[in-house]
Image: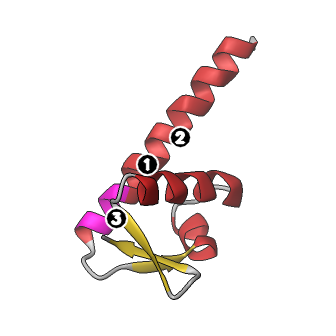
Amino acid sequence: MDVQAISRLNEEDFAAAIAQAKSHYVEMPGLTLTLAQAARLWACDVALCREVMATLVEARFLVRVRQSSFARA
């Protein structure tokens, strides 16, 4: 697999993880997850999950609560 294919796969994985995270937070009002809980729920590694959460916080879709959990903004 070439570098562009790997990059595209990573972008697709990231986009899928963002969509999955948003879907869970929309479907379950009041959902609050730690990074570890989110990684387990979405079956992804912690590094990917950390990037997803950071992106959603930056987009103001999520907020950080109690220093270690994430909830819908």
Q: What secondary structure is marked by label 3?
A: helix
User: Which stretch did the figure color magenta?
Assistant: 22-26
Q: Residue furthest bottom?
A: 66
Is 44 left, or right, of 71 in this rendering? right
Neighbours of disc 2 within 10 Å: few (<14), some (14-19), many (20+): some
Residue 24: which disc? Answer: 3
Q: State whether residue 16 is above or below residue 30.
A: above
Q: What secondary structure is marked by label 1?
A: helix
**Dots 2, 1 in contact, CB < 8 A:** yes
Report the predominant secondary structure element of the magenta stretch. Answer: helix
**Dots 3, 1 in contact, CB < 8 A:** no
Residue 59 place in picture, x, y as percent: 37, 52
- Which residue is at 51% across, 59% downward? 53
Marks 3 and 1, how far apart in space? 10 Å
Residue named by callout 2:
14
Is 24 left, or right, of 44 in this rendering? left
Instruction: State which tag comes first along the sequence, 2 or 3.
Output: 2
Is 53 left, or right, of 4 in this rendering? left
- Which residue is at 58% across, 21% downward? 8
Quadrant (top left/top right/bottom left/bottom right) for the N terminus: top right
Residue named by callout 1:
18
Q: Which three-letter amino acid code belongs to the residue tagged 1?
A: Ile
- Which residue is at 30% across, 70% downward? 73
Residue 13 place in picture, x, y as percent: 55, 38
